[in-house]
Image (cartoon, grey):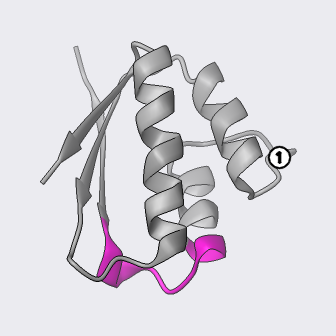
Amino acid sequence: MIMNKLILRTNKFTSKEHILRYLGFAMHFPDYYGCNLDALQDCLGDVEDDWEILIERSDDDAEWFEKTCVVLERAAGMNPCIKLTKM
């Protein structure tokens, strides 16, 4: 089985909008994806391909990065196609 993989590092993103656009693009979300945390949660719930998302945190993560991680963690707990790994 081929698993898609994403690596999210705090220092690679400049804002919540940046990481949300990246996730939408990388995970091929539909055109109506709204680039906000609620839309992220909804689209992650609909993911049918297998994804491994690796999160590399730092001690000074921005609040928006933390909130995005919470949504990813919640989605991984609800959708078996999403595997979340903290590095």
Q: Quadrant of residue 60?
A: bottom left
Q: Of helix, strand and loop, which mostly describes the magenta segment?
A: helix
| x 41%, y 27%: residue | 76
On the rendered image, what quadrant is the N terminus found in? top left
| x 87%, y 44%: residue | 32
**Is residue 13 shown left or right of residue 54?**
right
Residue 65, image x and y in percent?
46, 67
Residue 62, image x and y in percent?
44, 79
Q: Quadrant of residue 80?
A: top left
Q: Is residue 4 magenta?
A: no
Which amino acid, by three-letter code, is at mark 1?
Answer: Asp
**Is residue 16 shown left or right of residue 82?**
right
| x 54%, y 63%: residue | 22
On the rendered image, what quadrant is the C terminus found in? bottom left
Residue that carries the numbered disc 1 in the rendered image: 31
Secondary-structure class at tag 1: loop
Q: Does the magenta stretch include residue 16?
A: yes
Q: Is residue 3 above or below residue 8?
A: above
**Dot 1: few (<14), some (14–19), or many (≥20) neighbours within 10 Å?**
few
| x 46%, y 41%: residue | 72
**The magenta segment:** 9-18
**Is residue 33 shown left or right of residue 9?**
right
Residue 16, image x and y in percent?
60, 72
Q: Is residue 87 above or below residue 65?
A: above
Q: Is residue 10 above or below residue 40?
A: below
